[in-house]
Image: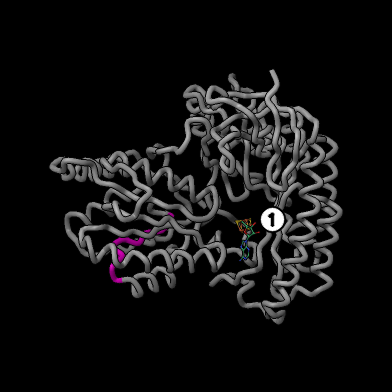
């Protein structure tokens, strides 16, 4: 598969559209306002930052209030049915705003609309949606918007592309301290339940030099927490001469005070070498998000995951030996088609054996076009719900015990702001990527602080700053 990088001529063409819109907005006394909401995974949030970057260059400011917006854009997710239904509900609720303000532009983009059936259903159900565009044409947003503003009508662009990388798009990041950096796009794994390979196309890696330059620039801008993103970062580097462990090594050797996180790892491609690189690093977080999905070999095979329970357990053993304070998190799917009570019990036993520090748990959701959606699925949703609650209970116990081991310990915390739940605290993340709330001050924001942990909550740690 050849990867096509968007050419500088193509980007230049988009800049002309940006200027065209900017000039049209000049006559306004205030800048137009955009409301942009991204659903789903970090990759989508990162796309949302690029969308905001482009809109900002066009002269838009941003609002959190849909009633004040001149442009409303939903950047959607397709991973589970409930994410799709939520978008349908939220788009439907915009009808009255469009009635009040016919100049309002409503746009829906991202994974959900990359599926033709869903895009068409959205277009048909909501005639007031002006613009629908998929994941492969994000860089042409200026052109799409120009056609709405200057020509009117509706736009639907869900062009498919197996491999496209757009470098050099503007980014409007939410934070000065934290940034996410995509290192690759798409996925080749075709886990049988997953829609991602269909909506994000084939796997393609950014050039190592582009990633390293971006990270260097972030560090020199004062960014302290850099999250590397990809659907399966462990297979990074095809078509380049650098693999993921080597990329991490090169980033770890950069000068400065910063941390590197990454997600998501796939157990079939996670190597001992990668674990060694993390163990020997100065900047890489002691956190691996390693989705196991299920504890039964039979179901892992049906899911096309490419590893066995035994392989996973060996990997975990190795990682915990090499990185004793490792924060190990996972994803689990309950109720995959054909899963029996005995398969589910294997998942429970794996959870009890591994004792994940935390887990994201999902009930299987059939996705159009995937292999699993065609499989027999005889277990009732009531039964799946029961299994799901059992799983939550087991994980709740493991998670609480895991956080309790930090009580009395000193953790180095990157403070990123005021406490979210309680304003008397400042909050941040430890090198294990665990949320720590502590008695800080405004001056701690953006700095690394040593905190003695006094109490473990199920989702965070509480502590006192020490000098
Ligand atoms: N149903 C339920 N969960 C899913 N995931 C992906 N596809 C589905 C689906 N069809 C979960 C997996 C994945 C996480 C991002 O979402 O656990 O790791
Ligand atoms: Fe989906 Fe599997 Fe690819 Fe992850 S690795 S995005 S679960 S197909």
Reading the image, the residue beneath label 1 is 331
Please identify the quarter of the rendering in which residue 74 is found.
Answer: bottom left
Q: Which residues are magenta?
A: 127-135
Residue at 77% in and 33% down: 276
Q: Is residue 134 magenta?
A: yes
The location of residue 49, given as percent across then percent down, is: 43, 43
Please identify the quarter of the rendering in which residue 238 is found.
Answer: top right
The total number of labels drawn is 1
Residue at 76% in and 31% down: 279
Please identify the quarter of the rendering in which residue 100 is found.
Answer: bottom left
Residue at 59% in and 19% down: 255
Whereabouts is ligand 1, in terms of quadrant? Answer: bottom right
Q: Viewed as shown, does residue 196 lie left or right of 411? A: left
The location of residue 404, given as percent across then percent down, is: 80, 41
Label 1: which secondary element: strand
10 Å crowding of disc 1: few (<14), some (14-19), many (20+): some
Quarter of the image for the C terminus: give it. top right
């Amino acid at each position: 598969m050849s990867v096509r990088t968007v050419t500088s001529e193509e980007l230049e063409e988009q800049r002309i559209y940006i200027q065209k819109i900017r000039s049209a907005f000049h006559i306004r006394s205030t800048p137009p306002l955009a409301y942009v909401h991204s659903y789903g995974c970090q990759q989508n949030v990162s796309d949302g930052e690029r969308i905001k970057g482009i809109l900002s260059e066009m002269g838009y400011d941003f609002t959190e209030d849909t009633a004040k917006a001149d442009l409303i854009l939903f950047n959607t997710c397709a991973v589970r049915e409930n994410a799709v239904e939520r978008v349908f509900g939220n788009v439907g609720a915009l009808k009255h705003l469009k009635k009040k303000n016919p100049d309002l532009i409503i746009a829906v983009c991202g994974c959900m609309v990359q599926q033709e059936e869903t895009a068409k259903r959205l277009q048909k159900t909501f005639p007031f949606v002006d613009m629908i565009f998929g994941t492969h044409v994000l860089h042409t947003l200026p052109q799409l918007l120009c056609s709405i503003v200057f020509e009117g009508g509706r736009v639907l662009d869900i062009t498919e592309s197996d491999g496209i990388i757009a470098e050099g798009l503007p980014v409007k990041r939410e934070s000065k301290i934290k940034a996410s950096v995509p290192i690759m796009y798409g996925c080749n794994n075709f886990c049988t339940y997953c829609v991602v390979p269909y909506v994000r196309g084939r796997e393609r890696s950014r050039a190592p030099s582009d990633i390293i330059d971006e990270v260097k620039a972030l560090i020199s801008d004062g960014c302290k927490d850099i999250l590397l993103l990809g659907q399966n970062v462990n297979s990074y580097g095809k078509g380049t001469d650098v693999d993921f462990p080597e990329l991490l090594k090169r980033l770890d050797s950069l000068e400065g005070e910063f941390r590197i996180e990454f997600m998501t790892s796939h157990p079939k491609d996670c190597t001992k070498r990668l674990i060694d690189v993390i163990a020997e690093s100065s900047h890489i977080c002691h956190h691996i998000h390693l989705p196991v999905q299920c504890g039964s070999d039979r179901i892992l095979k049906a899911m096309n995951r490419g590893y066995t329970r035994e392989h996973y357990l060996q990997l975990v053993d190795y990682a915990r030996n090499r990185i004793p304070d490792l924060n190990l998190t996972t994803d689990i799917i309950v109720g995959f088609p054909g899963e029996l009570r005995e398969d589910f019990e294997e998942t429970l036993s794996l959870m009890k054996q591994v004792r994940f520090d935390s887990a994201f748990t999902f009930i299987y959701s059939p996705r159009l076009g995937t292999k699993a959606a065609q499989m027999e699925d005889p277990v009732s949703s009531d039964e799946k719900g029961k299994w799901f609650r059992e799983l939550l209970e087991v994980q709740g116990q493991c998670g609480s015990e895991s956080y309790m081991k930090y009580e009395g310990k000193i953790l180095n915390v990157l403070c990123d702001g005021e406490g979210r739940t309680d304003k008397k605290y400042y909050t941040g993340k430890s090198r294990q990527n665990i949320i720590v709330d502590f008695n800080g001050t405004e001056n701690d924001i953006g700095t690394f602080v040593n905190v003695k942990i006094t109490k473990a909550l199920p989702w965070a740690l509480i502590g006192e700053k020490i000098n």
